[in-house]
Amino acid sequence: MTMDAVFTKENIQEMDPFILLSTLNTKLRNDFDSLAAFCDHYNLDQSTLMTKLGTFGYEYIGEINQFRMP
């Protein structure tokens, strides 16, 4: 399965939050310079990702381009 198939709106809603966190941070580190660029590439809503991971205590930190606990 390709990453394009993994990062769909439906898969993100159902994905385990820790797998999402790990996969997303890896993609941000290796392939994208911002969350906005990632979301544009995969046609995703940035606020949906932030809300999903925020529910589990993570927030996006733009300066380091990662989701982390504050």
Image (spheres, rainbow, N blue to C red):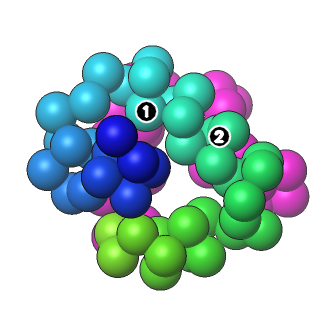
Q: Quadrant of residue 44?
A: bottom left
Q: Position of residue 68 (x, y in %)?
A: 66, 32
Residue type beneath disc 2:
Asn
Q: Which residue is at a point 64% across and 27% down the rendered structure image?
A: 69
Dot 2, how many residues are within 10 Å of its Cα: few (below 14), some (14-19), or many (20+)? some
Q: Could you tell me residue 4's position as x and y percent?
A: 38, 58
Looking at marks 1 and 2 on the same chain, the residue that comes earlier in the sequence is marked by: 1
How far from the left and from the top, in percent, is residue 55? 34, 32
Placement of 21 over or under 25, stated as above or below: above
Disc 1/disc 2 C-alpha distance (Å)? 8 Å
User: Does the image show residue 47?
Assistant: no
Verify whether residue 58 appears in magenta. yes
Query: Can you identify the residue that label 1 sits on?
Result: 20
Q: Is residue 4 above or below residue 43?
A: above
Q: How crowded is mark 1: few (under 14 residues within 10 Å), some or many (20 or more)?
A: many
- The quadrant the C terminus occupies is top right
Query: Which region is colored magenta?
Result: 45-70
Q: Which of the 4 image quarters holds residue 35? A: bottom right
- Residue 39: give its label: none
User: In front here: 69 or 19?
Assistant: 19
* Viewer-closest of 31 and 53: 31
Left or right of 45, for residue 18: right
Mark 1 residue type: Leu
Q: In which quarter of the image is residue 67?
A: top right
Question: Is residue 4 visible from the viewing direction of this image?
Answer: yes
Residue occupying image coordinates x 41% and y 48%: 2
Q: Are marks 1 and 2 in contact (CB under 8 Å)?
A: no
Magenta stretch holds residue 22 = no
Q: Identify the residue shown where x is 44% and y is 49%.
A: 3
Q: Is residue 54 above or below residue 15?
A: below
Q: Name the residue under label 2.
A: 25
Helix, strand or loop under label 1: helix
